Image: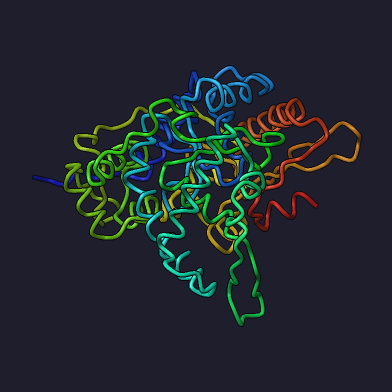
Amino acid sequence: MTTPTMTTAERRARLARRHLLSDRAAGVADVAEGVVALHATDPATVYLSAAARLAGSGTGGDAVDAVDHALYEERSAVRMLGMRRTMFVVGRDVAPLVQAGCAADIERKQRRLLLRHLEQTGIPDLGRWLSGVEDATVGALRARGTARAAQLAEDEPRLRTEIVMAAGKPYESTTYITNRVLFLLAAAGRIVRGRPGGSWLSTQYEWSLTDDWLPGGIPEPEPEEARTALLQRYLRAYGPVREADIRWWTGWTAAQTRRALADAAAETVDLDGAAAFVASGDVEPTPEPQPWVALLPALDPTPMGWTDRDWFVGPHRSALFDRNGNIGPTIWCDGRIVGGWAHRWNGEGTGGEVATRLLEDVGTERTALVAAEAERLTQRLRSWLSDAVVVPRFRTPLERELSA
């Protein structure tokens, strides 16, 4: 049998339609489904990624309301630790797959690391001691209902146990174990991040017991089943992908990746002369989308979905990524990145504005579409933030330059 071939044009058409950039979504659940998981390391990404994909969002105020409703009222989406030890917002149906397929492994590794750091304290029977701290923290949270990290440390003083990080290094520091214990509890699925303490740009969340926040908790299937199901979703959204893409996106080992590929019955295709994978039977051509442009935020899930990015980044990588591979705000045109943008204070007393720069000639028509989209995003951000501006957590060369 001849191996099907996937072209760059087909990849770009799939990206446009499946990631809801040419065909917009009706709701936040559809957005989360389309990209599998919304990056949430930078809180602004969740809102800006959703707004870029929601149909009929006007100035964007209703996009903020829609995300807040999905996260905090309806709770059809949940913020959780997942792939690559990264924070994501995922749909309720994906949460069990992320928990069993990724977070459980992360919790075990981070527990071993914390126990090694705790050896310096001289506390006896560390494994039992740490479990006791975790159980007491859960008990304190149950008594309060919701709580911030500092409040839990008041209730359970052992959370203020100090450890030395990077001992002997120039950047040596001493820190409490509070956030590391909460990290373990969240990775184990026992607690969950709720509402932020401030605006939607805040990273200071109220914690809740998972069973209180999500009645019934997060079911945990067998790890192999979870990885297979999660891979099937990833293949449907991002395929064709190489094995290296899968390992990078998930954080799995080579053995876990190959087992999931076999169990998912992934189909092999030819991608530029090398093997790549799509979901079983997913080889039919994608209808060509209408011309489109989009302004995507820093850490948007689309450009962060592959480790091989040349086919959509082209020669612009150095301007748009930081040294650790985190992407900044980007301008997309018909399935490829053609520039970048930044949100900056306009100096006129009317709030922030979106400044753009095209890194290549896209023609008069597309240039006008980019300008219109930038103005639309400017008005959205003013309606959300008034005088505040969005500064990405990981800043890139072009974003810094445009912000100056």
- Quadrant location of the N terminus? top left
Q: Nearer the viewer, residue 299 or 206?
A: 206
Along the viewing direction, whichever of 212 and 360 lies nearer the viewer: 212
Residue 211, visible in the rendered structure: yes
**Residue under the image location 23 percent in, 59 percent down:** 255
Is 68 left, or right, of 313 in this rendering?
A: right
Q: Is residue 383 above or below residue 252?
A: above
* Residue 329 in view here: no
Q: In which image quadrant can residue 50 be found?
A: top right
> Which one is nearer the viewer's eye here, 227 or 31?
227
14 lies left or right of 202: left
Nearer-the-camera pick, 202 or 132: 132
Vertical relation: 160 (above or below) 155: below
- Measured as percent of width and height from the top left, residue 149 is found at 62, 46
Extreme residue in the right direction: 348
Q: Residue at x 83, y 41 (%)?
A: 345
Give the farthest residue toward the left.
Answer: 1
Q: Quadrant of residue 107?
A: bottom left
State the image coordinates of residue 114 (x, y, percent, origin top left).
48, 64
- Identify the image's colour scheme: rainbow, by chain, secondary structure or one colour: rainbow
Residue at left offset 91%, top offset 36%: 348
Where residue 98 sits in the image (x, y, percent)?
37, 42
Q: How many marks?
A: 0
Q: Is 387 on the left-hand or right-hand side of 6?
A: right
Q: Residue lying farthest front?
A: 124
Q: Position of residue 87 (x, y in %)?
A: 51, 46
